[in-house]
Image (spheres, rainbow, N blue to C red):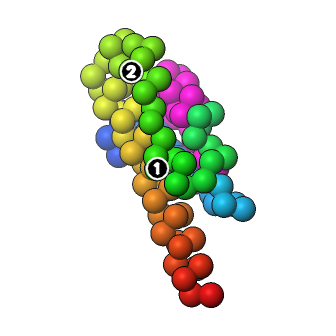
Amino acid sequence: MKNKIKGCQSTVWLVASYEDGSVFFKADSDAVIVKGLISMLIKVLSGHSPAEIIEARLDFIRDIGMMTHLAQTRSNGLLSMIKQMKNYAIAFQTISTQKTDHK
């Protein structure tokens, strides 16, 4: 159950790595639609700095009407995926800041 996102009806696994100041995500799911949702988030957020991910406004999700076309459980799952990706960014930013402060 390692790397499983809590709050998703489907099973979603998300891992993140931090390389040269950027966060990179990889994910998988047991549901096809959720694979598409997490792939979309990875395309938008992966490869950016922690600060950029934390500050990212994902208004396009609302603007294209995606939340209105998803069942409530899928919408909640999408929000959980976004939250987890931002939490990874916060963690990497904290670790990076601590390393810089100790030099």
Residue 101 versus residue 96 in the image, above or below? below
Mark 1 or mark 2: whose residue is earlier in sequence:
1
Q: Which residue is nearer to you in this view: 53 or 31?
A: 53
Disc 1 marks which amino acid?
Ile
Q: Tell me, yes or no, if residue 22 can be seen here.
A: yes
Residue 92: assigned label? none
Residue that mark 1 sits on? 54
In three-dimensional space, the C-alpha distance between marks 1 and 2, rounded to whole angstroms, equals: 18 Å
Q: Secondary structure at mark 2?
A: helix
Residue 3 screen position, x and y as percent: 48, 53
Q: Which residues are magenta?
A: 23-41
Give the residue displayed 42% in from the left and 17% down from the top. Answer: 63
Classify mark 2: residues with Cα within 10 Å, few (<14), some (14-19) or many (20+): few
Give the residue displayed 63% in from the left and 33% down from the top. Answer: 43
Residue 51 part of the magenta segment: no
Residue 103 screen position, x and y as percent: 62, 87
Residue 62: assigned label? 2
Give the residue displayed 45% in from the left and 36% down from the top. Answer: 57
Q: Residue furthest bottom?
A: 103
Give the residue displayed 46% in from the left and 50% down from the top. Answer: 54
Residue 84 screen position, x and y as percent: 42, 48
Q: Which residue is nearer to you in this view: 32 or 92?
A: 92
Disc 2 marks which amino acid?
Arg
Residue 48 versus residue 29 in the image, above or below? below
Q: Residue furthest left?
A: 72
Residue 37 part of the magenta segment: yes
Q: Which residue is nearer to you in this view: 21 or 10?
A: 21
